Image: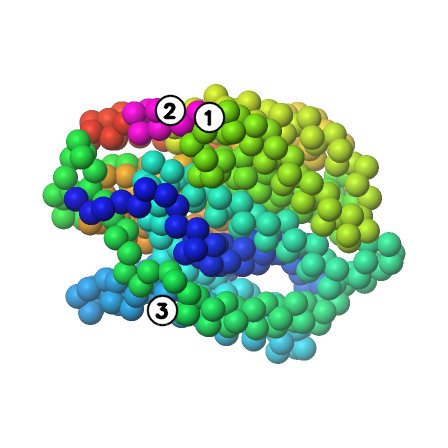
Amino acid sequence: MSTQNLKTNWAQFIPLVTVFFFWGFVAASNDILIPVFKKAFDLTQGQSQLVSVAFYVAYTVGSIIYMIISYLTKGDLINRMGYKNALALGLVISALGTLLFYPAANTGSFPLMLSGLFIVALGFSLQQTVANPLAIALGPITTGSQRLTMAGGINNLGTTIGPLIVSFAIFGSATSGNTDMSIESVKVPYLVLGAAFLLVAVLLKFSSLPDKPAAVVEEEGVEVSTRSSALKYPQLLLGMIGIFVYVGVEVSTASNLPAYMESDLGFDTKDIAPFISLYWASLMIGRWTGAVEAFTDNMNTQRILRFVAPYLAFGVFLGVNKFMNHDLTPFYVYALIILVLIFADMASKGNPARMLLIFSVLGIAALLVGMATDGMVSVYAFTSVGLFCSTLWPCIFTLAISGLGKHTSQGSSFLIMMIMGGGLVSWLQGYVADITSIHTSYIVGVLCFAYLAFYAWKVSGILKSQGIDFDKKVSGGH
């Protein structure tokens, strides 16, 4: 059995999470580009969701390219390149994608814009395949999902800031009263982003991140991996669908929110950015809360941090929006909704399957409340979906790759492939909205959460039959 780290390696973990920030910054910025492109190019709601389709399907294409190259060369591409080289290459690919925004903005080309986003996400696909299992490997397996949750919290710092910066680039300050949309103004932030990609690629290349970490550990008492492929494990197969619908509901809830606020509530496009920022900040709030176990083993300290961490993250959201001169009055009531998250996190007791079940049920409840109400109540309900999506990625990812042994890297690639759900589910909801209404279209998200609740129930039995019991793994954690 490989030797497992007893503590999180912060010197390696901190440089790694910079790429998580970029993923969030770009993904959330798409939610501002969607209504802008919809008006500028005169698109239907379904057509506007091609932004999400181009971005998230690129993850699948990237994973397929990775597997084909690995198959043709008869060896795992990432293991051959080394983890640092693979991360650096992914960042360079993403930087090349940002260059397309310059001719796309100058010529007003929607297809060229989509192509740029596709290439950016193609680089992200390689980065994700490396970074997610690496985050789990940089410390004890018992806190792997919490470490991935923490990385997700940094991701959502990017999602909180991204919409505000891109909105500022297009419309100017919140107090300017400018409602004109200039496609050309999009190119500057994305060119700057490309330069940042290249800078971080160099920094990671010379960081202390391991080139070939012991990413897979067979644990005592766990069935030894003797199966011929990762696809022979039911927890992975069901988890792939789980990642598909999870990313789908997370992205589609946000990407269709601007259209709902414009058409049903009469908001101007320029005034929607703070609410998109709040949605993605909600994921940061939840992930900071879910990551407290990675900081300390002391149960009393954990109890305190469970209340401090979410409101600290909420304070970051308020501070950033204050800096951008947005009115904070509509957001103070959200502090009460955060309490639901805190108590749900405490009820999960560190078990990823239990957390997945509880948060999926709460996600269903939030969407149903949003569909049954109107006005700001519905906006808060839809926005709170971000709170309940916050820890689902690490829960599904950890459950899906548990027990895969030497097939963990392959399983990770299959999971990254399913990120395409973010584009396809968003398009599906946009299509449903075109034939019904934006309000009604959120039923798509309800069905996604329903599957996640089923997976949470089903996977516990599957893993226990293989000798994996997360209740035993996390005993004493809360």
Secondary structure state at the residue bearing disc 3 = helix
Please tell me whether mark 3 or mark 2 is closer to you in this view.
2
At 56% across and 32% down in the image, what residue appears? Answer: 305
Q: Is residue 314 magenta?
A: no
Disc 2, disc 1: CB below 8 Å? yes
At 47% across and 54% down in the image, what residue appears? Answer: 14
Q: Is residue 104 left or right of residue 410?
A: right
Amino acid, disc 1: Met
- Residue 171 percent across, percent down from the top left: 78, 61
Can you tell which mark lies on residue 85? 3
At 72% across and 50% down in the image, what residue appears? Answer: 320
Q: In this figure, which residue is indicated by the disc labeled 2? A: 476
- Residue 244 percent across, percent down from the top left: 42, 44
Q: In this figure, which residue is indicated by the disc labeled 1? A: 299
Highlighted range, magenta: 470-478
Please tell me whether mark 3 or mark 1 is closer to you in this view.
1
Quick one: 147 or 169, which is closer to the camera?
147
Q: Is residue 344 left or right of residue 39?
A: left
Disc 3, disc 2: CB below 8 Å? no
In which quadrant of the rendered image does the C terminus lie? top left
C-alpha span from label 3 to label 2: 38 Å
C-alpha span from label 2 to label 1: 8 Å
Secondary structure state at the residue bearing disc 2 = loop
* Mark 2 Cα shell of 10 Å, populated few (<14), some (14-19), many (≥20): few
The tag earlier along the polypeptide, 3 or 2, is: 3
- Residue 238 percent across, percent down from the top left: 32, 37
Q: Is residue 360 left or right of residue 454?
A: right
Judge whether 191 appears above or below 276 on screen: below
